[in-house]
Image (cartoon, rainbow, N blue to C red):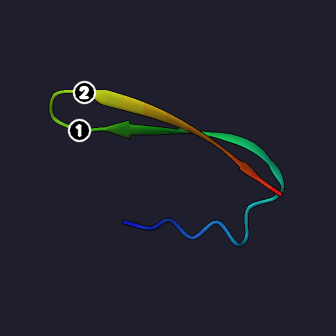
Amino acid sequence: DRIDVTNLSEGMYLLKIQTENKTVIKRFVKN
C-alpha cells in the first residue's frame, strides 16, 4: 500500500497503523 504525501507540508510525521493484533508506529520525514 502506498500513501500519497505530495500535499503534506514538510516535517516529521508519525504514522500509526493498527492491524488486528498489533499496532505499528512508523516515523518518516518529508522534505
On the image, the x and y values in percent for residue 3 come to: 50, 65
Identity of the residue furthest to the top in this view: 22
**Residue receiving disc 1:** 19
Q: Is residue 3 left or right of residue 18?
A: right
Q: Is residue 21 left or right of residue 12?
A: left
Identity of the residue furthest to the left in this view: 20
Distance in Å between CA atoms under marks 2 and 1: 5 Å
**Residue receiving disc 2:** 22
Q: Secondary structure at mark 1?
A: loop
Q: Do the residues under discs 2 and 1 have CB atoms within 8 angstroms?
A: yes
Q: Amino acid at mark 2?
A: Lys
**As drawn, 8 above or below 15:** below
Look at 70% across and 72% down and name the residue there.
Answer: 6
**As drawn, 23 above or below 11:** above
Q: Is residue 18 left or right of residue 7?
A: left
Q: Is residue 28 left or right of residue 21?
A: right
On the image, the x and y values in percent for residue 7 come to: 73, 70
Instruction: Specify the label residue 28 is tagged with.
Output: none
Q: Residue 18 falls in which quadrant of the image?
A: top left
**As drawn, 8 above or below 22:** below
On the image, the x and y values in percent for residue 14 come to: 60, 37
For the C terminus, the image quarter is: bottom right
Q: Secondary structure at mark 2?
A: loop
On the image, the x and y values in percent for residue 2 come to: 44, 67
Q: Amino acid at mark 1?
A: Thr
Binning the other alpha carbons within 10 Å of mark 2 as few (below 14), some (14 to 19) or many (20 upward) gives few
Look at 36% across and 65% down and name the residue there.
Answer: 1
